[in-house]
């Protein structure tokens, strides 16, 4: 098994370049199945979730090439198998976007239920509701989702999501792009990667408006044509490095970001006493020595992202006084990392959806294990802060979502290496 060995105590200094957004890439790549032609997608992060998705698309019959680093070309104009390979599908959560793409383009799908980080119960009832509202007959057994057109065929519809769901918003957008008529998604999620997907589809000839608001309108078109599109920078990767700089006490220019997407994270770090200077496509993060306690409540975008819960918790564990961290999206997310942080000396008390974090003078190196992607990232930050050596196991979770983590961190002065046991 691979692990990271980290010798903590060195402040991060220098420049880090943020890669393309994982959660945009894992939506846009399956959406390329809708296109009769070749999509050239740029700024694609080289992470395992992307590599798995490209293997799935290739196995379905799409022509996939990687002409240069960060660029993927997908040609779905040929014969496509509407039953993607189960074992690969089960390796990641975002494989469920194949359901929307296959329904929209081919009117049928047979897709195994997704895998991915299981830090909470992650149902897909809103996805299924959307597909049914679009006229699909959905057979949703314990292992598969099987879809075909219902007796009245596929037709645009007005769909009100019972919960603000990124995945359901994306899956319905993908399915509706080629379904005749107008589809309206009410109570839609507004994350940057939803806007990015809409921009990608519109570049290929779709007619989507309102992405980034809570009402998204899609007017189905006959077909989509090929084209070129560049993915936005990863808001959560950027936030992770910003939190690492704050926790280790460094001074780093985080470049290739969209500052607007970072506002909630930036605001919280400034509350904690971190000096932040935003530029057009970069943000300078400069520690001023001590961190102040704060209060965070995770919310759907534009609120503080749940995917930054674990990382800000590490900053809180090094801040003065009592901080409070309330999770409002996934009720059990704390359990993916708090025990590990406590073994490193953090003082965290969890009461239902709220953690009280009492700042400590030091964290101490320990042998810890990642249980999901962002928990793993938080443990890396804790190892960078801790006195002594930290080993982080199960780093396959981390490598799902962070491109060249070792290279980027060592360039900032971190003492971290990847070891295979
Ligand atoms: C996406 O997951 C992200 N994953 C997650 O990031 C992120 O934490 C989450 O959005 C929230 O921002 C990808 O984009 C691949 P949701 P998703 O549907 O789509 C409930 C990471 O670290 N819900 O917005 O699965 C659900 O249980 C990952 O990059 C239903 O009840 O999240 C949750 O409480 C981890 N029924 C809430 O909605 C449904 O059908 C939000 O989930 C769907 C969701």
Image: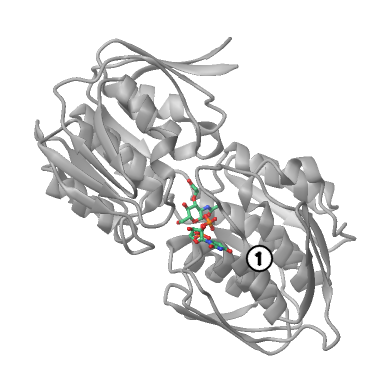
The image quadrant that residue 16 belongs to is top left
Looking at the image, which residue sits at the far right?
79
Q: Vertically, is 365 above or below 408?
A: above
**Residue extending farthest front:** 351
Identified at 26% across, 23% down, the residue is 385
Q: Nearer the viewer, residue 72 or 209?
A: 209
Bin the neighbour count of mark 1 within 10 Å (Cα to Cα): few under 14, some 14-19, many 20 and up. some
Residue displayed at 82% across by 89% down: 152
Residue 286 rendering spot, x and y as whole percentages: 16, 38
Please provide percent x and percent y for residue 263: 26, 58
> In the image, residue 375 lies at what x, y percent?
43, 35
Callout count? 1
Vertical side of 140 occupied by 150: above or below: below
Q: Secondary structure at mark 1?
A: strand
For residue 204, side relative to residue 306 (left or right): right
**Residue placed at 80% from the left, 45% from the top?**
86
Residue under circle 1?
227
Residue 125 vs residue 3, the one in the foreground: 125
Q: Residue at x 13, y 49 (%)?
A: 271
Screen quadrant of the C terminus: top right
State the residue in front, 333 or 135: 333
């Amino acid at each position: 098994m691979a692990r990271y060995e980290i010798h903590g105590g060195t402040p991060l200094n220098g420049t880090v370049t943020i890669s393309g957004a994982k959660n945009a890439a894992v939506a846009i790549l399956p959406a390329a199945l809708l296109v009769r032609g070749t999509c050239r997608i740029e700024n694609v992060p080289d992470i395992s979730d992307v590599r798995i998705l490209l293997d799935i698309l290739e196995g379905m019959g799409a022509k996939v090439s990687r002409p240069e680093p960060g660029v993927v070309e997908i040609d779905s104009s040929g014969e496509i198998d509407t039953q993607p390979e189960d074992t690969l599908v089960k390796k990641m959560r975002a494989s469920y976007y194949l359901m929307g793409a296959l329904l929209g383009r081919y009117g049928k799908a047979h897709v195994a239920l997704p895998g991915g980080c299981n830090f909470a119960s992650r149902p897909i009832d809103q996805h299924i509701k959307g597909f049914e509202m679009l006229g699909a007959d959905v057979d949703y057994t314990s292992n598969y989702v099987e879809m075909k057109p219902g007796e009245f065929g596929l037709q645009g519809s007005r769909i009100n999501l019972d919960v603000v769901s990124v995945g359901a918003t994306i899956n319905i957008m993908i399915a509706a792009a080629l379904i005749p008529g107008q589809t309206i998604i009410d109570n839609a999620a507004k994350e940057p990667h939803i806007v990015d997907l809409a921009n990608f589809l519109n570049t290929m000839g779709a007619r989507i408006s309102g992405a980034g608001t809570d009402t998204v309108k899609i007017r189905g078109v006959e077909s989509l044509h090929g084209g070129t599109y560049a993915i936005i920078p990863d808001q959560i990767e950027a936030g992770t490095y910003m939190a690492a700089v704050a926790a280790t006490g460094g001074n780093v220019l985080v470049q290739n970001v969209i500052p607007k997407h970072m506002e909630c994270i930036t605001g919280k770090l400034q509350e904690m006493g971190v000096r932040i200077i935003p530029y057009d496509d970069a943000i300078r993060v400069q520690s001023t020595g001590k961190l102040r306690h704060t209060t965070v409540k995770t919310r759907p975008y534009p609120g503080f992202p749940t995917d930054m819960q674990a990382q800000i918790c590490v900053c809180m564990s090094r801040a003065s006084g009592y901080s409070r961290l309330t999770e409002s999206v996934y009720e059990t997310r704390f359990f993916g990392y708090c025990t590990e942080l406590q073994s490193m000396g953090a003082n965290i008390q969890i009461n239902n959806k709220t953690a009280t974090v009492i700042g400590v003078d030091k964290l101490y190196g320990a042998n810890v294990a990642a249980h999901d992607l962002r928990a793993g990232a938080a443990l890396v930050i804790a190892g960078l802060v801790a006195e002594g050596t930290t080993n982080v196991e199960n780093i396959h979770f981390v490598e799902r979502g962070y491109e060249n983590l070792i290279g980027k961190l060592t360039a900032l002065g971190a003492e971290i290496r990847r070891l295979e046991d």
